[in-house]
Amino acid sequence: MKRIIIQLILILIPLCTSAQGNLPLLPLPVLELLQYQVQKGKRAVAPYLFSKYGLRRIPAELVVDESRQLWGWHVGPNTDFDQSKHPFYRLFAKKDNSSLAVIDDRGGALQIVFWNKGYYRALVSGLQSHGYQLQQVKPTSNVLRFQREGSSVIADVTVWADMYVLELHN
C-alpha cells in the first residue's frame, strides 16, 4: 500500500508543477539562431526553423505584412497593445514562465521576446561561448550589446522590468 502511494505521489509531482505554469524552458541553440541570421542576409533561409523547437506560427495579417513572420510558445495577444504607441514586440503577452515569441523580419532583424530570466542566462551564455563579448554602450541604456570580432551579426539584449528582447541583426 505504501508503495502505491509513493508511486502516485511521484507521478503527481510533475503534473502539479506543470499546472502551476512552471514548464521547462525551450532549448534554443544560439549557434543555430546566429547561423539563421547570417543565412537571411544571403537569402538562403529555411522557412520553418522555429517549428522544430515547438514554436507555432502566429497568423497576424492585421498587424504585420508578408515580410514578417511571428512565432510563439505559450503567448497570447497583449490587450493593451497600441501599434502607434508601443514597439512591435509589445504585441505579445506571456501565459506562463516558459513563454517565448519570435518576430522574424525576413529582410532584417530577428527578435526573440521572453519574460523569464532563465532564457536570458541561457542565451547570453550561448553568445559568450561562441566568442561574443559585451561591448561598452551608453551607461544609462537598457540595451546590452554583444559583438564578436570578425562576425557580421550583432546581438542586442534589451532589458525591461517586465520582459527581455534579444535582437540579432547584421
Image (cartoon, rainbow, N blue to C red):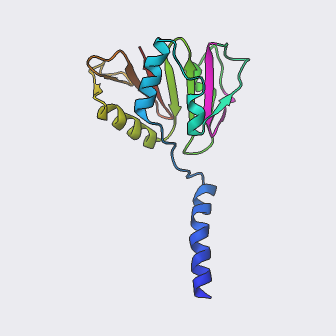
Quarter containing the C terminus = top left
In reply to whether residue 72 is colored magenta, the answer given is yes
Residue at 44%, 21% (x, y): give it.
168
Q: Is residue 4 above or below residue 85?
A: below
Expressed as whole percent of the image width and height from the top left, the position of residue 133 reads: 27, 27
Q: Judge from the rendering whether residue 69 lies leftward or rightward of residue 155; answer left or right.
A: right
Q: Is residue 18 above or below residue 61?
A: below
How many numbered circles does the render carry? 0
Q: Judge from the rendering whether residue 65 lies leftward or rightward of residue 143; answer left or right.
A: right
Quadrant of the image occupied by residue 131: top left
Q: Name, please, the residue furthest toward the bottom.
A: 1
Q: Name, please, the residue furthest toward the right.
A: 62
Expressed as whole percent of the image width and height from the top left, the position of residue 71 reads: 61, 29
Q: Judge from the rendering whether residue 76 lies leftward or rightward of residue 34; answer left or right.
A: right
Q: Judge from the rendering whether residue 33 lies leftward or rightward of residue 83; answer left or right.
A: left
Region rendered in magenta: 67-80
Q: Camera-side residue: 110 or 21? A: 110
In reply to whether residue 100 is colored magenta, the answer given is no
Q: Is residue 165 visible?
A: yes
Quadrant of the image occupied by residue 90: top right
Q: Is residue 25 above or below residue 63?
A: below
Residue at 57%, 59% (x, y): give it.
17
Q: Camera-side residue: 74 or 78? A: 74
Residue at 46%, 12% (x, y): give it.
41
Quadrant of the image occupied by residue 149: top left
Quarter containing the N terminus = bottom right
Expressed as whole percent of the image width and height from the top left, the position of residue 81 reads: 65, 24
Q: Is residue 78 visible?
A: no
Q: Main secondary structure of the magenta part?
A: strand
